[in-house]
């Protein structure tokens, strides 16, 4: 039997790992992003804003990707692998758009879905799944990043109410969000609260002058004597287990999403190398350029195989947090190196927004840091390997 010619965009034949349903989901996401994001994303990145973010959120809600791996309450109930494939396609367009989807579904919505009461789920999740309500996740603080056990935001009881004081920093979606899941210290330990952002005592300021994730709004949330009813607290989340479970969901999406940025950069570099001529022939015909293309494709294929393995484990209920750290650490680190290598193939054109590579490279600098830095994931894996914690 004669085998078909290799597909330059899938040299390892990774498509064979997908079911027909998974391919259909991937295609639906790709077609939608091609239509509503790709024609505009360079302009949004350069401007540092999305003109109609609420319209975009509703489009993504109609597509079914907001909380798509959650069941009930208007959510799609798709598999973890299908959600990962969607993250890959979304980040192939831009990390900022994938951040919008991840913060909405894997952080804010997941926190309510996993730890909230039935009344809280009914009140918030359907509107968030449809993109009619936008959420954010308030864990990071100005002086607390990798050490969430030492949160300074404080919630205290006042009769039947809660009073929250504190400050949250680097909160994606905050400038346009309707609701935040805020984590705070209480006399009972760390607890989560559903906080409408139009509550008295809340000030949200957008963080400007970013050179990364420019098509994603990031903000600071200040809470000054914010009074909430007793039923604003997530009843089932106690201690660090609550916020860390949400971070693990978001990290899983990054394992896949970072590959999207890498894939777009590889394909952009490959096509450029075939079209660009120097010394009388395409630069794709030079050995050093081919080595770069091969190395990038090799690392992408390995990262995809790891993501697929983790997705199948998650669908089987067997995925451990340390394994998510393995995926996040490897795939983001390799994706950013792929983008840097692709940039060298494009030469001076590599820094132009006429091509997607520098945008993806800059975005991945943020992805490398959020949801756990390289250092933190290294220490998580180091403890798993040795049994000895080395965090302090």
Image (tube, rainbow, N blue to C red):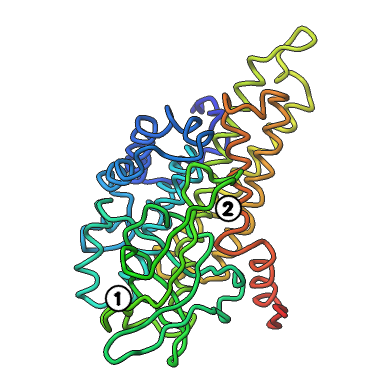
Considering only vertical position in the picture, is 146 above or below 366?
below
Work out which quarter of the rendered image holds the C terminus and state it.
bottom right
Q: Is 239 left or right of 231, judged from the image as shown?
A: right
Q: Is residue 329 left or right of residue 7?
A: right
Q: Is residue 73 visible?
A: yes
Question: Which x, y percent locates residue 217?
Answer: 46, 49
Judged from the image, the secondary structure of the residue bearing numbered disc 1 is loop
Q: Which mark is residue 267?
A: none
Residue lying at 42% horizontally and 54% vertically, measured from the top left: 175
Q: Position of residue 327 (x, y in %)?
A: 58, 59
Taking depth in this image into account, of 204 and 26 the one nearest to the observer is: 204
* Residue at screen point 48% across, 68% down: 319
| Mark 2 neighbour class, 10 Å CA radius: few under 14, some 14 to 19, many 20 or more | many
Between 7 and 82, the one lying in front of the other is 82
Whether residue 252 is visible:
no
In this figure, which residue is indicated by the disc labeled 2?
367
The percent coordinates of residue 14 (x first, y second) are: 50, 42
Q: Earlier in the sequence, mark 1 or mark 2?
A: 1
In the visual, does 197 lie left or right of 170?
Answer: left
């Amino acid at each position: 039997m004669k085998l078909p010619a290799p597909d330059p965009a899938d040299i390892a034949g990774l498509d064979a790992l997908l079911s027909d349903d998974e391919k259909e989901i991937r295609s639906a996401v790709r077609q939608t992003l091609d239509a509503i994001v790709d024609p505009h994303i360079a302009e949004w990145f350069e401007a540092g804003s999305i003109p109609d973010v609420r319209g975009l959120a509703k489009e993504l809600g109609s597509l079914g990707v907001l909380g798509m791996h959650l069941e009930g309450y208007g959510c799609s109930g798709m598999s973890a692998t299908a959600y990962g494939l969607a993250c890959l396609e979304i980040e192939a367009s831009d990390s900022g758009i994938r951040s919008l989807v991840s913060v909405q579904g894997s952080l804010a919505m997941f926190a309510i879905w996993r730890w909230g009461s039935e009344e809280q789920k009914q009140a918030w999740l359907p509107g968030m799944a449809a993109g009619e309500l936008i959420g954010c996740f308030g864990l990071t603080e100005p002086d607390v990043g990798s050490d969430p056990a030492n949160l300074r935001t404080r919630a205290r009881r006042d009769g039947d109410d809660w009073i929250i004081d504190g400050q949250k920093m680097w909160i994606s979606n905050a400038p346009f969000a309707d609701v935040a899941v805020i984590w705070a210290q209480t006399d009972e330990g760390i607890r989560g609260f559903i906080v409408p952002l139009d509550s008295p005592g809340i000030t949200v300021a957008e963080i400007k002058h970013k050179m990364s994730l420019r098509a994603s709004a990031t903000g600071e949330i200040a809470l000054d004597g914010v009074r909430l009813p007793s039923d604003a607290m997530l009843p089932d989340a106690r201690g660090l287990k609550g916020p860390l479970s949400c971070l693990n969901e978001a990290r899983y999406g990054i394992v896949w999403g970072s590959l999207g940025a890498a894939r777009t950069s590889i394909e952009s570099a490959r096509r450029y190398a075939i079209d660009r001529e120097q010394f009388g022939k395409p630069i794709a015909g030079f050995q050093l350029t081919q080595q770069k293309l091969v190395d990038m494709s090799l690392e992408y294929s390995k990262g995809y195989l790891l993501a697929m393995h983790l997705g199948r484990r998650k669908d089987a209920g067997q995925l451990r947090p340390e394994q998510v750290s393995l995926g996040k650490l490897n795939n983001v680190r390799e994706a950013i190196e792929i983008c840097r290598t692709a940039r060298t193939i494009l030469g001076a054109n590599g820094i132009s927004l006429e091509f997607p590579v520098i945008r993806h490279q800059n975005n991945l600098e943020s992805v490398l840091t959020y949801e756990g830095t390289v250092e933190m994931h290294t220490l998580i894996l180091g403890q798993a390997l040795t049994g000895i914690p080395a965090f302090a």
